[in-house]
Image (cartoon, coloured by chain):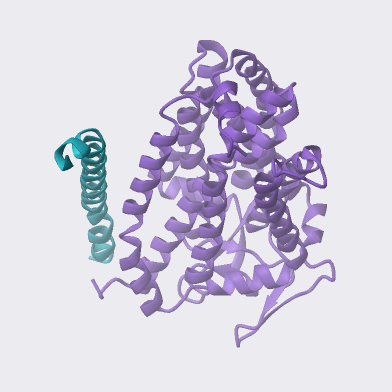
Chain colours: A cyan, B purple
Amino acid sequence: MEYLEGMIWYAMWPVVIILSVKFVQHNLQHFDKLERLEAYEKKYGKEIEA
Amino acid sequence: METLSLYTLQTYWWLLVSIIGALFVFMTFVQGGQTLLYALGKTPDERDVIINSLGRKWELTFTALVMFGGALFAAFPLFYAVSFGGAYYVWMAILFCFIIQAVSYEYRKKPDNLFGERFYEIMLFLNGSLGIFLIGAALGTLYSGGNFIVDAMHLSHWTKQTYGLEALLNPFNVAFGLMLVFLSRIQGALYLYNNIAEETIAQRALHALKINTLLFLPLFLYVAGNMLFGTGYGYDPTTKVVTAESMKLLHNLIAYPLLAIILVTGIAALLYGIYAALFKQNKKAIWYSGIGTVLTITVLLFNLGVNHTVYYPSLADLQSSLTIENSSGSHYTLFVMSIVSLLVPVVLGYIYAVWRSMDKTKITIDEVKSDAHHY
């Protein structure tokens, strides 16, 4: 039982890493989507305004 | 989670410090690349492309160094006080070697540059050679020891008037420093081989890789041999009395076989990276050698904090030696910082994303010429 708390702490890390990767991926996808929207607006925005 | 014991937290923080130190050593490919500037770049255009390739990454190396110092300061403040206050001349010399790097990247191409490009290129060489050599010598003292005394009130003083420069008289520290210089040049050559789409530079990088590997290997064998088979220092878990022990670090590896396996894997990956570049012309070789470097250095540093080992022996008074147990912050500090450290993978994730985005296309002379804001 001496090392139990340490083992739990280190066992948490793979979960933390997976969650972090998911978070960063999600954020980057959102960024890509916004960039595509900006390009779309640049291309067709003026036509819609007119 | 508040039940995490102080010893668990101390070990965890020593592991984090070891990983950050290892990441820094990997990132010194920037410094290594700087020292290869004139060996790989024979024309001003070629030197520009090398500087720009390295210039995209230099802040990451600097950040890793600051994080290494910052983590040591936060988790093991007594070490920070003893070493940075005592071995003052060495740390100040290192600091100046890194100040000139930042200035050189920013001012080398500025209009009306008073000193000329060559001046800043010499500064970059000094940063890559002297800076890394001194950091290596300072890291070597974690194994060979420093001349300090710590009293019961945790006040420390250095016992030599040379304030750290005496470390350069120890052949082990000198070899450690030179080993890091040649390792950084190996990584620098592999990085530029991967990152620049100019065949002449790539061929010269392979030549530099061969020479620097031949210089690195004997130094590495000497340093690793001395570490594992030389005298180490341990302490009694109950009485905390420090004693010298022959082959202490080797005994630690035997006691924790996982560390030994990671160490051997790391060394093998480092050597495979060099082999893959030299004999298979594999442009991705830096990733093998990089992962190998990170694993190797992590284990070599972490080894000093496990199995009741001293990580900073005192040559002046053995009982003043620092261990993870007698030099750490309080339980509260370490616990709060441990919770914050759970965000580290998010930061690393963004660094990875930025890195990939920067390296999506390989850098060329034409690209550098067409960019008015290049380094």
- Seen at 74% across and 67% down, the residue is B88
Toward the bottom, the furthest residue is B153
- Seen at 37% across and 73% down, the residue is B6
On the image, the x and y values in percent for residue B282 come to 48, 16
Q: Is residue A44 above or below residue B340?
A: above
On the image, the x and y values in percent for residue B142 come to 63, 58
On the image, the x and y values in percent for residue B97 come to 72, 53
On the image, the x and y values in percent for residue B200 come to 64, 14
Horizontally, residue B284 falls left or right of residue A16, namely right
Quarter assignment of residue B49: top right
Horizontally, residue B323 falls left or right of residue B351, namely right
Horizontally, residue B239 falls left or right of residue B375, namely left
- Seen at 59% across and 70% down, the residue is B79
Viewport quadrant of the N terminus of chain B: bottom left
Toward the left, the furthest residue is A48
Q: Is residue B222 above or below residue B136?
A: above
Counting labels gives 0
Viewer-nearest residue: B320 or B153: B153
Q: Is residue B250 visible?
A: no
Toward the front, the furthest residue is A50
Horizontally, residue B111 falls left or right of residue A46, namely right
Viewer-nearest residue: B210 or B258: B210
Viewport quadrant of the C terminus of chain B: top right
Q: Is residue A47 visible?
A: yes
Quarter assignment of residue B193: top right
Quarter assignment of residue B354: top left
- Seen at 69% across and 28% down, the residue is B47
